[in-house]
Amino acid sequence: MVQTIKECQNIQYGILDEKRWLYNIINDRMVVSKQPLETYLEEINEPSNPLYDFYHSSYKRGTMMNFHLFRVIWDSSKIDFFHKTTLFLINKYLIFVMMMLNVLYLPQFIDKSSLSAEQFSLNQLPIFELIAIYFTMVAVILPLHEYAHFSVYYKYFQPPKITFGFAIRYFSMPVFFIKVPFYKLLSNKKKNELIMAGIKFQVVIWFLLSVIHMVSPSSFVSSMLVVNIGLITTNLLPFLKLDGYWYISNILKVDDYMGYFKNMFLKKVAFRLDIFILGILNYILIILSIFGFTYDIVKLFI
C-alpha cells in the first residue's frame, strides 16, 4: 500500500491512525498531533497560527555526535528512474543469487589477492591508493547505500522532495544521509525492508567488484572489495547507529533502544535486561571506535 505524502509550504504531512505527522523540510522538525493541523498550513505566516514557531524556527545541524556538514533538497521526480532501478537491483531473489555467487568467489578472490592483514592497515597502503579508496567509499558506496534506503521509502510514500547530505558521526565517521521522516508510519515488516535495503545494495556492489576482480584483478579492486565487505559487517552490528542498530530496535519493538536505555535510568520506562546489556556494549564500542580512529590518524603522522 502506498500512502502518498502531501506537501504545502515546504511542510510534508501524512495521516495514520487519526494522527497527523507534519515534517518541516527546511528546519528538519517533526510534530505529531491528533488535531487536524494541516488546516493551518495555508496561513502559516500569521504569528497567531499554532504552527508559526514550527514553521519559522531555524535549522539545527544535528548534534555533536551526529553533526550535519551540509544538505541538499531536491525534487524527487527528477530521480524517479533511479528509484526503480535500485528497487530492481535489491529484489530479494536477485540479492540471494548475487550473495551465493559472492560467497562462491570468495576463496578464489583470497587466493588471487594473496591478502595479508598488513596490506590493509592505514600506514601500509600507498597514500594515493588510500585517498582513492577513501574517496570511493565516501562519495560512491555510502551514498548508494543510503539511496537504497530512500528507494524503499519512496516506494511506500512517494514524497515530493528528497533531503540528503553529509554528516560527521561520533566525531570521526563521515556519513552520507537521506532523510526518511515518516519511517515510523511503516509496519514492522516494511521498516525492516527499508533498513536492510542499504546492505542489500552493498551486496550488489560486492558482486560487481567480484566480476571486475575476476576479469581484471588489481590491488585497488581488491582493497575496495575488502572495504565494502567491512562496511557491510559494520552496518550489521547492532551498536553504532547504523542499520543493525535500527534493525535490532525494531525487533525489540522500540523506536530507538538507546533512547529507551537512557529513559530506564530516568525511570520513565520499565527496566529491560536485554536493552540494558545492549546499551552498555554500545557505549563501550563508541568509546573504542573514537580511540581507534584517533590512534590511526596519529600513526599517519608518526
Image (cartoon, rainbow, N blue to C red):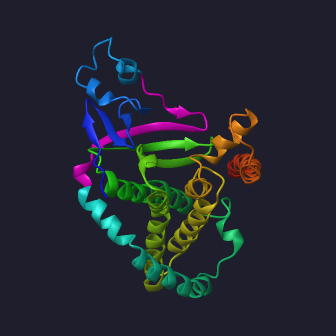
Seen at 50% across and 79% down, the residue is: 99
User: Horizontal and vertical percent for residue 71?
Assistant: 40, 39
Confirm whether residue 302 shows in the render: no
Vertical order, 103 against 294 (above or below)? below
Q: Does residue 36 show up?
A: yes
Q: Quadrant of the N terminus?
A: bottom left
Q: Residue at x 40, y 60 (%)?
A: 148
- The image quadrant that residue 35 belongs to is top left
Magenta residue check for 65? yes
Q: From the viewer's side, name the closer residue of 226 and 167.
A: 167
| Magenta residue span | 58-79
Q: Is residue 278 left or right of residue 90?
A: right
Q: Is residue 68 above or below residue 158?
A: above
Q: Nearer the viewer, residue 282 or 7?
A: 7
Residue 27 at x, y = what percent? 40, 29
Outermost residue to the front: 18
Q: Position of residue 290 (x, y in %)?
A: 70, 46
**Would you say residue 198 sits in the magenta stretch?**
no
Determine the image quadrant of residue 20: top left
Extreme residue in the top direction: 48
- What residue is rendered at 28% in x and 23% in y? 40
Give the residue displayed 29% in from the left and 46% down from the top: 159
In the rendered structure, the answer to whether residue 201 lies left or right of residue 15 reads right
Residue 158: x %, y % from top left: 28, 51
Residue 53 drawn above or below residue 83: above
